[in-house]
Image: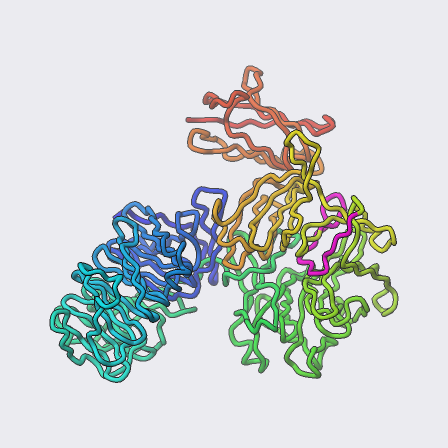
Amino acid sequence: MKRLLPVLLFLVTLAVEAQTNGSVWTNYLSYRHADRCEAIGEVVFGIYDGNLLAYDEATEEVRLFYKADGLGGKGIIGSAATDKLALLYSDGMVDLLNPEDESIGHITSLKTSTSDVGTPQSIAFTDRYITVGTSQGVAWLDADRLEVRGYYALGASVTSAGYTNGKIYAVAGGKLLVGNTADNLYDITNWKQIYPNTVLIIATGSGGIYAQTRSHGLLWIDENTYATQSLASERFSAWHRHGTRTVFFNTEKAVLFADEAPQSATTLTLDTAPLDVLPLASTRLYLCQGDEGMQAYRIGGEGTLTADASPITGYGAQTDRTGFMYFTSDARLLCSGGSFDYYENTFYAPNAGYYDGGRWTFLQSEGIAEQIGTPYRSLTSIAQDPDDASHHFVATGDYGLFEFRDGAFVKQYNLGNSPLRSFYANSRSYVRVDALCYDKNGNLWMSNEQVDTVLRVLKTDGTWRSVFVNEIKGCRHVNNILFDTDGRLWATQRDWIGNMRGGVLCVSLGDLNDPDAHTSTFRYNARNEDGTSVDFSQGVYCILQDAEGRIWFGAYSGLFVIDNPAGYGASDFLVTQVKVPRNDGTNYADYLLDGTPCTALATDGADRKWIGTENNGLYLVSSDGTEILAHFDSENSPLPSDNILALAVNPDNGEVFIGTDQGLVSYQSYVTRAAESLNRDNLLVYPNPARPDKGDVVTISGLTANADVKIITTNGFAVAAGTSTGGTFRWDGTDTSGHRVAAGIYYILVATEDAGEHIAAKVAVVR
């Protein structure tokens, strides 16, 4: 078997450097909660919250798979293996991974017809055939031909199914049915019930099937006579088959069977409640233990289990929900779960930490709830003390503000020790905090939602202040606070609830000790530059200030720009909707993303705008927005979802982090911040030497904005030229005619835009 390529790992207290796979996209999905595992040869595959991981037992190498590797999507709900790995997705897609060459085939018919076949629920794989149970019937798939051989509506939900020796078995509405594939199985009368009582799950074996019944324990049913034998009196909730071994298990016990003698079973006592059990051999198995990862065990006498090696876990982000991201001044990426709606009654596991120098570090989450006597969950935002990188605060959607030092929980701020209030009388619950942001003086601002006074401040001396703004009194979702370069506070309200409209607030602050020393303006509509009325009352989701001082904000109704932030309170205020020329020979233009919900915003080193949308993917536009430079979605890129929750750009290297509702990935834009002046010591040229015929692109960073760059030969002929984007220029090793240049030494001549400064470097091109 071909060795699976390793991912570069840097493990420090559950941290991992992400896998690049030789592309501009990088995978930061979460591989921390092990749900399911399979094995082919020496490679063990694990499914972690819908993401695929492979572990080579011989080399101890780990491989993290995602869409850039050819997977059909995100959200794996089931798996089965023979000599190939079959993966079932929640949308009905089935992938077939061949470990010999890592090729991945797709069976898409169920995905494109889920309204007709129902929701997928189970998968089994025998020989070359796959059976998929759905909420309405059973599908029979051919793994070699990558096609659906048939779909059979059985008039009930099929919770378990399997194939062996020309027969399909299905548990439909608790009835165990069998159909011979030589018959017309589209005719439901050709399906026969072979056991009179209720069956819960089945697994096909050699010469028969294992059937877990509701009232008569676990049975072996002969495939020819349908005679039954009792194997165990317990009720098991799941099973797994590998080769000729099948294991049935529940939270406390597993029973391992061999087809040649199913009556002679090995009983194992489980200390943990595994989500999956993979029987590799009579003396060895793997357990998927949720947050404890995937762990190998040796089977000893009397069914004892001894851990073999370390658990396989701890890769990527903490969870696949990353709805809040922010880069600190020292290029540390802060992450948390993001916005939360209490009324959806969906609470998210705690997720707060940072990505720093190629590794992940997460703040304490275990034990906090027990210590404080309330849940610790749904973390809306995170902030780092600008004067102490070990000091963090985390806001929660319903239990106040939490303080951490060196990653450890220090204190909860709630009713009784802070001015934070609950929107429900004096309950310790419903203390909703969001939008953490430090001002230039080191004071921590936050929103305390759905109460009289929404804006709260924790000052550097540990005292609190509250700033009452009548326009946002009682607002439900103030998810963003931004301080512009002139010190004004901007905040956004993302929903229209009751009489509280979505919109943008601007506050000119005075002395924090004087509760009335501020003026404010809240707008939910305006006129644009054409005099047309525009409305953003349905909600404003994101806001930023660009390098030119303009305020951009994304709303349910589109994208808007405040060209003059100082004039926001004026009666003649206008908002700009950027126009993108059609370039079709007319003078017509269209408003940029008009009517498209814009959910996230970020700028890169060239002040270009990255725009995340709700279900329409990711856009890159020019600094003024008049040119759409790229549009990425889940169909044309490795984005795991078109629903973008958060964006952040590393100012040092141009890596764009993209948080979606299905996981975190990044795109390497190679656009860095422009330097204020040219300095040879800050100029970086890489790779050097470069091999353009192997895909190398020479990157030159440390440049000033719009710097003039020329690539010349040693005898003075220019082969390429251009200007820097932000602080970076890239050369693909071709000349002005598009041909590969010859091997040799090339000089790089750089001049500032005004030609006032010059600098030179060189690069070697080899073949």
Give the camera-side residue of 100 and 334.
100
Give the camera-side residue of 546 and 555.
555
Residue lying at 21% horizontally and 81% vertically, measured from the top left: 232
Residue lying at 68% horizontally and 55% vertically, measured from the top left: 555
Q: Is residue 3 left or right of residue 465?
A: left
Give the camera-side residue of 143 and 6.
143
Q: Is 173 part of what is drawn in magenta?
A: no
Against 268, residue 611 (above or below) is: above
Against 53, residue 343 (above or below) is: below
Task: Place residue 591 in its image quadrant.
Answer: top right
Against 608, residue 221 (above or below) is: below
Q: Is residue 748 left or right of residue 591?
A: left
Instruction: Give the position of the C terminus as an image quadrant.
Output: top left
- Image: magenta residue range: 532-552
Residue lying at 51% horizontally and 30% vertically, measured from the top left: 732
**Residue 56 x/y as whole percent:** 31, 55
Task: Place residue 671 in its image quadrant.
Answer: top right
